[in-house]
Image (tube, rainbow, N blue to C red):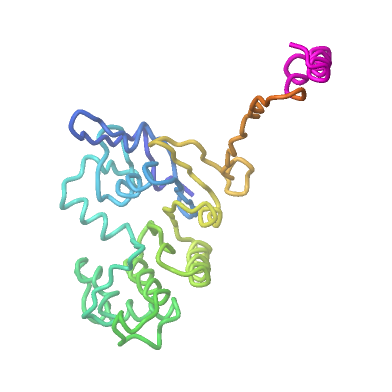
């Protein structure tokens, strides 16, 4: 289906005093059109750095990032903003909805920046809100919705620009388990419709919902493959305690353990006979 996202030896370094932090350290990967990929890792693994670079919110220190064949590292700020608006749909953990706008107005925002006319904006916003099950709440404000419903608005806003990539940053992080399953189900449905979905998460159980997992540790890729393969599962290493030596005790039993049966017998004879 063709490569949409490609990292070639991408590095992102930050200098903090005398220390250089390698947030991304020679990462190479490809994501094709229509894939559902999870980038997973714990805090400090580099997943957020990868998200920022994929989302054109940042550029590599070195290496090359190609988005649909275009070298993002060579774009200026205005070009980066244009490509974000045209090719990328963002879903955030905290929704980032504007509290004074109703749902249709919130979803229209990316189209306003894209210069889409009012009538078309309204029609497209209504269509995507209906597609995520919120057609009966078009005039509601965000504070009148549950957390799961607000995340659905965020998904609708990501879809309204018809992006090449849906980039979901910890989309279930602020939701309960039941609502999380609903949101993941919606992402799977979007993927089944041909959308490219890149999911960023620290949660292995969430990552397993994607078809492919890219696992990061210390800024490097440590696994890239099928989410159902044995290697995709994190192996938890449980430390095995070393056997502790028994503290020495006084008396014949301790002597028997330390010096053997003969020494113990001699001690018992001395004690019984009152010997020195």
Residue visible at 44% across and 68% down in the picture: 175
Query: Which of these two is toward me, 181 or 272?
Result: 272
Residue visible at 33% across and 35% down in the picture: 10
Judged left or right of residue 218, residue 259 is right
Query: Which of these two is toward me, 67 or 40?
Result: 40
Residues rendered magenta in the picture: 254-276
The image quadrant of residue 169 is bottom left
Judged left or right of residue 22, residue 176 is right
Q: Is residue 50 above or below residue 259?
A: below
Q: Is residue 192 above or below residue 77?
A: below
Residue 117: give x, y in percent of width and height.
21, 76
The image quadrant of residue 174 is bottom left
The image quadrant of residue 234 is top right
Residue 11: give x, y in percent of width and height.
31, 34
Query: Which of these two is toward me, 130 or 169?
Result: 169
User: Is residue 183 one of those drawn in magenta?
Assistant: no
Residue visible at 53% across and 72% down in the picture: 178
């Amino acid at each position: 289906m063709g490569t949409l996202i490609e990292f070639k030896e991408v590095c992102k370094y930050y200098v903090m005093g005398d220390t250089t932090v390698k947030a991304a350290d020679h990462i190479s990967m490809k994501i094709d059109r229509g894939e559902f990929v999870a980038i997973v890792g714990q805090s400090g693994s580099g997943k957020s750095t990868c998200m920022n670079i994929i989302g054109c919110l940042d550029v590599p220190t070195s290496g090359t990032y190609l988005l649909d064949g275009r070298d993002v590292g060579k774009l200026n700020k205005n070009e980066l903003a244009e490509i974000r608006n045209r090719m990328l749909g963002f879903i955030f953990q905290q929704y980032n909805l504007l509290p004074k706008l109703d749902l249709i107005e919130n979803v229209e925002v990316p189209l306003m920046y894209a210069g889409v006319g009012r009538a078309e904006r309204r029609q497209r916003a209504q269509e995507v809100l209906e597609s995520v099950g919120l057609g009966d709440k078009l005039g509601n404000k965000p504070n009148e919705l549950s957390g799961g419903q607000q995340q659905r608005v965020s998904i609708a806003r990501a879809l309204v620009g018809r992006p090449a990539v849906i980039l979901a940053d910890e989309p279930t992080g602020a939701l309960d388990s039941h609502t999380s399953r609903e949101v993941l189900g919606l992402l799977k449905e979007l993927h089944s419709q041909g959308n490219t979905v890149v999911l960023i998460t620290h949660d292995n159980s969430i990552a397993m919902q994607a078809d492919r997992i890219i696992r990061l540790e210390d800024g490097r890729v440590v696994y890239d493959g099928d989410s159902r393969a044995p290697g995709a599962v994190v192996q938890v290493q449980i430390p095995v305690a070393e056997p502790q030596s028994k503290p020495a005790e006084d008396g014949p039993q301790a002597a028997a353990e330390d010096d053997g049966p003969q020494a113990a017998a001699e001690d018992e004879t001395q004690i019984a006979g009152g010997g020195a």
